Amino acid sequence: MTESTSPVHTLCAPLDPSLLQQVCIDKSWGPLKVEACVDISQLQVSINVSLYGTRIGGCTINSSHPSCSVGGSVGVASAKVEITLDTSTKELTYNIQLCVLGSCKNLSGVLYSWNLSEI
């Protein structure tokens, strides 16, 4: 009988620790989508906002410039998005006004948190 080796063991490479410091999140509310890529090691976030699949804006925030606003409209919908990086609470928060066919809704909350002390 011959001994076999699992290809999983022979193909695995060491994990790059920097990969654990970066995470991308996307969240949707109806026609609105917010994508945020957080680099925890540099406390920097790249943000893209789209409405009905059309990009309406984007920005990069960090501890020196901790918030940004993006707004625009596509067809019957409009949106105004404010994203804030709070380094003291280790959270990325949002405030959104989304309007479709003249009916508007305000939304707010935490998009991402990396406060590991709460785990």
Image: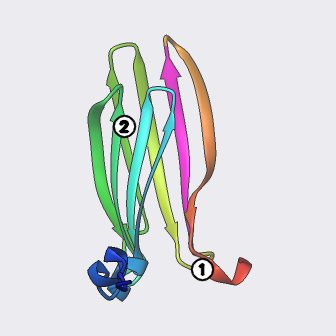
Q: Position of residue 10 (x, y in %)?
A: 29, 83
Rendered-image quadrant of the C terminus: bottom right
Please give the range of residues in magenta: 91-100
Q: Position of residue 37 (x, y in %)?
A: 37, 62
Q: Which residue is mark 2?
A: 71
Q: Residue at x 42, y 79 (%)?
A: 20
Residue 85 to residue 51: above or below: below
Amino acid type, label 1: Ser
Q: Which residue is mark 1?
A: 88
The answer to which quarter of the image holds residue 44 is bottom left
Rendered-image quadrant of the N terminus: bottom left
In the rendered structure, does residue 44 fall within the stretch colored magenta? no
Residue 82 to residue 74: above or below: below
Q: Nearer the viewer, residue 109 or 37?
A: 37
Is residue 32 in sight in this rendering?
yes
Residue 93 to residue 41: above or below: above
Q: Which mark is residue 75?
A: none
Is residue 63 in sight in this rendering?
no
Disc on the earlier residue, 2 or 1: 2
Q: Residue at x 50, y 22 (%)?
A: 99
Q: Residues within 10 Å of mark 1 (few under 14, many from 20)?
A: few
**56 horizontally vs 22: left or right:** left
Amino acid type, label 2: Gly
* Mark 2 to mark 1 CA distance (whole Å): 27 Å
**45 horizontally vs 81: left or right:** left
